[in-house]
Image (tube, rainbow, N blue to C red):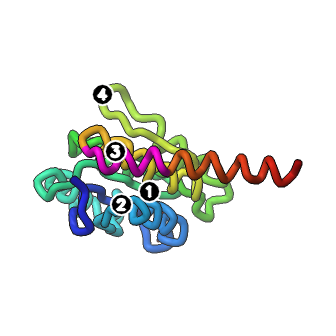
Amino acid sequence: MATEKSPQVAVVMGSDSDLKVMASCIDQLRDFGLTPTVRVISAHRTPQIAAEFAKSAESHGIQVIIAAAGLAAHLAGAMAAWSTLPVIGVPLAAESGLGGLDALLSTVQMPPGVPVATVAIGKPGAKNAAILAVQILARADATLRKKLVDFKAKQAKAVHDKDVTLG
Ligand code: RP5
């Protein structure tokens, strides 16, 4: 059962410069009543901490890891290398001039045996990562399942209302 205090989801990002995008992921998780653990950890700049975090995440109650990074984005892959928890990767568009395609390919093209569930680049992916994490947790949590049903219904109504307004 999800409570305000249970950090079942970890949101890790390669830099604090990623926070402006990942705020929408954190906000979405909070909207579902979750309080994620949020960390800045870099696969390249703090590799030891990345390994230690991934290895110990499950023992701290984490059930899903969301990992976001830009450029040569290896953070999600590093998490998946060191943990058997499901890892959702969010590729970000850092200032590389490639619009996040670099991070997308780095995150999604994992070798067989080490999957990373990769979502879209940037904000849409950040929001979807949160929803996907909730969907994973909801398999064993009826309260979250109900919240997901309500979320989908509200989303559908918003689209329908716009459709009616446009007439
Ligand atoms: C990546 O490098 C981070 O995830 C970030 O998207 C990008 C740039 O980091 P900063 O130079 O802004 O710290 O590792």
Mark 1 or mark 4: name the one nearer the start of the chain. Answer: 1
Name the magenta segment's main secondary structure. Answer: helix
Q: Nearer the viewer, residue 122 or 74?
A: 122
Q: Label 1 belongs to which residue?
A: 68
Within 8 Å of ligand 1, the CB of disc 1?
yes
Q: Which mark is residue 131?
A: none
Query: Earlier along the polypeptide chain: callout 4 or callout 2?
Result: 2
Distance between the alpha carbons at the discs numbered 3 and 1? 10 Å
Is label 4 in a helix, a strand or a loop?
loop
Q: Compared to 119, does 9 lie above or below?
A: below
Query: Residue 28 in the image: x percent, y percent?
Result: 46, 61
Residue 15 percent coordinates (x, y) = 43, 69
Query: What is the magenta range?
Result: 141-150
Q: Is residue 143 visible?
A: yes
Dot 1 alpha-carbon crowd within 10 angstroms: few under 14, some 14 to 19, many 20 or more:
many
Cα–Cα gap, marks 2 and 3: 10 Å
Distance from disc 4 to disc 2, alpha carbons, whole Å, reads: 23 Å
**Which amino acid, by three-letter code, is at mark 1?**
Ala
Q: CA distance from mark 1 to mark 4?
A: 20 Å
Mark 4 touching mark 2, by CB under 8 A?
Answer: no
| Label 2 to label 1: alpha-carbon separation | 8 Å
Does residue 89 appear in the picture of this structure?
no
Instruction: Answer left or right for 86 relative to 147.
Output: left
Query: Is 51 on the left-hand or right-hand side of 104?
Result: left
**SS for callout 1:** strand
The residue where tag 3 is placed is 87
Q: Is residue 85 magenta?
A: no
For the residue pair 128 and 53, the one nearer the viewer reads as 128
> Mark 3 to mark 4: distance in Å?
13 Å
Residue 56, given in percent of the width and then of the height, sits at 14, 55
Where residue 85 appears, as percent x and y from the top left, is 24, 43
Residue holding disc 2: 11
